[in-house]
């Protein structure tokens, strides 16, 4: 690719774009037909694509992936008893004055930090240029919708000044890149980052098939999505002698794991644009899909070792007709835990 002056190819440099402490009001809390809670990661990937299109190619920035750190989660649900129900709003009356039916919509207020893996061209290498671009992007985001919710301005009267957007260039040296990322990650505390744990799904399936060869991936996914209590018989000594007792224990879980949708799988061929009636966009090819699920985990950002462990990337495999988001998080090894303090910046 050549620049606008035709003097040679454009140089692109790795960077991180950080939009801290975004307040999103009334985001979509029904992330798929089988899950509810935090919005699906596909919603944030879609937000990234919409932001890149709004900026245009002349902005000098290319988006590759997005990571999400959650600082606050406030679902709009009832609070009486153990059962939770969404707080619903009634639609306006119909044209004849009759009351319209209530359509169930799950809503949640979010306090999040978005971290984008980006590339910037050479004209944004200066501190002033990167700061100006970060402010320009922040202004665009203020007028957009994220995960179906509205991006709200910072609350007035805060004791601390709102954090500013940041566009930080990443060093080319791998060791220095890790140090830079870990230094930035400490700014996102307190909070939790959503990462992928596909490995847990496969390992739990293998464990279940040892006792039940007919166990499927769905069985493993459901088992990891719930709290399982198990009873065990024991004997206790009392003044009158030993008596039988029952002890209840919860199956251990490898961290704060959650069921999440990660993309879509095709149900039909790719129909040419304009051939499907009532399609939202008649200029884009259309394909019917259904959700794809996996297991995610909420991890404190300071425990992540690299950008790829935080960021989710979109991936399309036409052979399997799979559209899904990929995250390269890997549980830390003992050696990594021992050397974590050495990599931490002073």
Image (cartoon, rainbow, N blue to C red):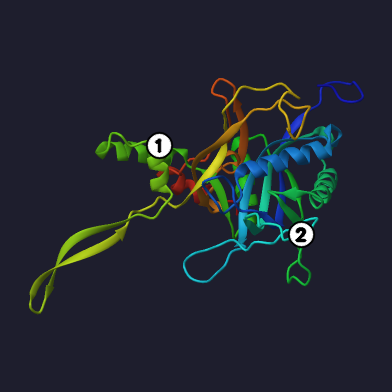
How far across and how far down the image is residue 8, in percent? 85, 20
- Image quadrant containing the C terminus: bottom right
**Residue ID at (59%, 47%):** 31
Whole-number angstrom distance, CA of label 2 to CA of label 1: 44 Å
User: Residue 217, which numbered label?
Assistant: 1
**Residue ID at (44%, 52%):** 255
Badge 1: residue crowd in 10 Å (few <14, some 14–19, many ≥20)? some
**Quarter holding residue 270:** top right
Residue farthest left in this picture: 241
> Which is nearer the N-term, disc 2 or disc 1?
2
- Image quadrant containing the N terminus: top right
Let me know if residue 125 appears in the view. Answer: no
Can you say whether 232 is above or below 308 in the image?
below
How far across and how far down the image is residue 249, in percent? 30, 60
How many labels, in total?
2
Q: Which residue is mark 2?
A: 92
Badge 2: residue crowd in 10 Å (few <14, some 14–19, many ≥20)? few
Q: Nearer the viewer, residue 332 or 316?
A: 316
Q: Nearer the viewer, residue 15 or 296?
A: 296
User: Residue 103, which numbered label?
Assistant: none
Can you say whether 135 is above or below 78 in the image?
above
How far across and how far down the image is residue 88, in percent? 64, 61
């Amino acid at each position: 690719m050549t620049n606008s002056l035709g003097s040679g190819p454009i140089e692109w440099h790795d960077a991180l774009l950080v939009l801290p402490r975004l307040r999103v009001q009334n985001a979509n809390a029904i992330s798929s037909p089988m899950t509810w809670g935090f919005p699906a990661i596909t919603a944030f990937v879609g937000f990234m694509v919409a932001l890149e299109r709004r900026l245009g190619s002349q902005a000098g920035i290319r988006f590759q992936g997005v990571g999400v750190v959650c600082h606050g989660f406030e679902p709009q649900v009832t609070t009486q008893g153990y059962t939770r129900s969404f707080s619903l709003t009634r639609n306006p009356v119909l044209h004849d004055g009759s009351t319209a039916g209530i359509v169930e919509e799950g809503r949640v207020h979010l306090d999040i930090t978005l971290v984008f893996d980006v590339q910037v061209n050479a004209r944004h290498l200066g501190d002033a240029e990167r700061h100006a671009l970060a402010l320009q992007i922040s202004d665009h985001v203020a007028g957009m919708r994220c995960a179906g919710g509205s991006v709200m301005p910072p609350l007035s009267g805060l004791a601390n000044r709102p954090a500013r957007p940041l566009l930080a260039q990443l060093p080319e040296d791998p060791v220095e890149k890790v140090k830079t990322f870990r230094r930035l990650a400490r700014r996102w505390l307190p909070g939790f980052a959503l990462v992928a744990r596909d490995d847990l799904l496969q390992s739990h399936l293998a464990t279940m098939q040892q006792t039940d060869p007919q166990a499927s991936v769905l069985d493993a996914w459901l088992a990891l999505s719930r709290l399982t209590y198990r009873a065990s018989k024991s004997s206790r000594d009392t003044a009158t002698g030993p008596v039988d007792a029952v002890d209840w224990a919860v199956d251990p879980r490898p961290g704060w794991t959650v069921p999440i949708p990660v993309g879509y799988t095709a149900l039909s061929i790719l129909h040419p644009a304009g051939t499907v009636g009532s399609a939202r966009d008649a200029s884009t090819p259309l394909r019917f899909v259904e959700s794809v699920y996996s297991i995610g985990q909420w991890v404190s950002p300071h425990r992540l070792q690299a950008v790829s462990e935080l960021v989710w990337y979109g991936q399309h495999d036409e052979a399997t007709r799979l559209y899904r988001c990929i995250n390269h998080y890997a549980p830390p090894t003992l050696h990594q835990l021992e050397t974590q303090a050495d990599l931490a910046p002073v």
